[in-house]
Image (cartoon, rainbow, N blue to C red):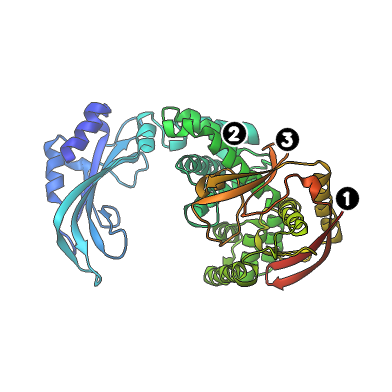
Amino acid sequence: MERRSFEFHTKILKIHLEKYAVSVFAGDNDAEKDEESANTWHKLGIPKERIAFLPKKDNWWGPAGNTGICGPDTEMFFYSGKKATKKFNPEDKNWVEIGNNVLMQYTKDEKGNYALAKQKNIDFGGGVERTLAVLNGFNDNYLTEIWQPLIKEIEKISHKNYQEHKKEMRIIADHIKASVFIIADGIVPSNTGQGYVLRRLIRRAIRHSKLLNIETNITSILAEKVIYIYKDYENLTKNKEIILKEIEKEETKFRSTLEKGIRQFNKLAENQKEVSEKESFLLFQSYGFPIEMTEEMAKEKGIKVNIKEFQNEYQKHQELSRTLSAGTFKSGLSDNSEKTTRLHTATHLLNEAMSRVLGPEVAQRGSNITPERTRFDFVFNRKLTNEEIKEIENIVNNLVKKALVVKSEELDYKKAVESGAKGEFGHKYPEKVTVYTVLDAEEEKGYFSREICTGPHVKNTKEIGKIKITEQSSVSAGVRRIKAIVENN
């Protein structure tokens, strides 16, 4: 394997031998010194002074967990300076690693003992970005052509220089690039699984853009650059529209609460050594801050976050959601009468209106609708002000006046979510669902609200009547309830 790696570097990539060095495992009580790799490198033409024997912390891989396959590795280095030193010094930053061969020949058991594996494998690792940087004479991957269009765009938008803001610009560029590829594979931002990883990436990038004083949406602009850089990747080009739509939607959603969330965090972090689980959960629930973001911000201020207790709080929240989704609120509608149907559609409009007025983290936690009134439970951490209630009512009543068409269609659940349809948190949906859309040509996306629902609904918003919120109350920690009625026009 050393021969193949050597030929790849010296014959294919044309790296000169005078700028080439390697390291091998020095050996310890667990595994023997890797004389075999060292001798092979020497026979290939590498002088002995360019072969360094290093300990386990430098030249050993794995296992991935506490137990399993592992072994020594031999690493290859390129001298990025003008003239390489005669002897290889691993501490010299001019020697840049460009590849490694992992010799997976041992297994580690639960007691920490190492034994020779029955099946031995060799795994070559060589990062494209690092190799490209080295071959172009850069010590910094982000100066290469696969990063520079992104970096230059961030510099242009922020009016700041990369050399003075490397950390922020690298995070933004790296996270947006990763997000583009993830969305292209069919993942959309959410609070669970892969969708949560995606959400964390996008929101961390947005937060660091704010540190550069960027106050306008940038993710879709940068996503366009990523798709241009990798224009030969068919998966990106064919999914361009959905990539730009999803990343822009997530940024718009998060920016609407980001400033308030930062102010709330600064208030919570003032004069204390730890952000409590309830405080971090508030930032997550009401302002959309992933716990990892709160932890990062706390670290910057030299304080801690109680991660374990946050997880306990989150689990309690999930249990509450499951409880609310079952029992009383399972059916939602008391009957299918005309009045109940009007109030049902009105509830959908209220849901979206509250999200726009109070913030995108507002999420349905159950509804109970009768001919007399709608009762709607939702995630929110405080009492609504009179001004907020009035604004929500005005939004809905203006939609009624506009006489908007309510459209229904059958879709696969995954396609429904990808199309922007909202669903109730914690609810298990079948493979095929009905999506109700309140069309509105004045909206950028062509509709006001879009939800997964079994119906029934009115055909046009003019049938609803005038909405009025009559009362509000607290259901439990972080969950509130409103009641509303409709009056004939």
Q: State the residue position of label 1.
A: 489
Q: Amino acid at mark 2?
A: Ile
Image position of 43 with respect to 478: above or below: above
Image quadrant in which the N terminus is located: top left
Q: Is residue 359 left or right of residue 230?
A: right
Q: Amino acid at mark 1?
A: Asn
Quick one: label 1, few (<14), some, or many (20+) residues within 10 Å? few
Could you say which is closer to the camera, residue 454 or residue 50? Answer: 454
Observer-side mark, 3 or 1, equals 1
Q: Residue at x 24, y 72 (%)?
A: 111
Q: State the residue position of label 3.
A: 441
Quick one: label 3, few (<14), some, or many (20+) residues within 10 Å? few
In which quadrant of the rendered view does residue 459 lie?
Answer: top right
Observer-side mark, 3 or 2, equals 3
Residue 460 on image: x %, y %: 75, 44
Question: Which numbered disc flags the more N-terminal residue, 3 or 2?
Answer: 2
Residue 118 on image: x %, y %: 13, 58
Please say if the residues under marks 3 and 2 sit with CB atoms less than 8 Å apart.
no
Quick one: label 2, few (<14), some, or many (20+) residues within 10 Å? some
Q: How many angstroms separate mark 3 from mark 1 (CA)?
A: 23 Å
Q: State the residue position of label 2.
A: 221
Observer-side mark, 1 or 2, equals 1
Question: Which numbered disc flags the more N-terminal residue, 1 or 2?
Answer: 2
Residue 211 on image: x %, y %: 64, 46
Judge whether residue 162 can be spotted in this image.
no
Secondary structure state at the residue bearing disc 1:
loop
Q: Residue at x 56, y 45 (%)?
A: 410
Secondary structure state at the residue bearing disc 2:
helix
Judge whether residue 191 can be spotted in this image.
yes
Q: How many angstroms separate mark 3 from mark 2 (CA)?
A: 24 Å
The residue most toward the front is: 337
Q: Amino acid at mark 3?
A: Ala
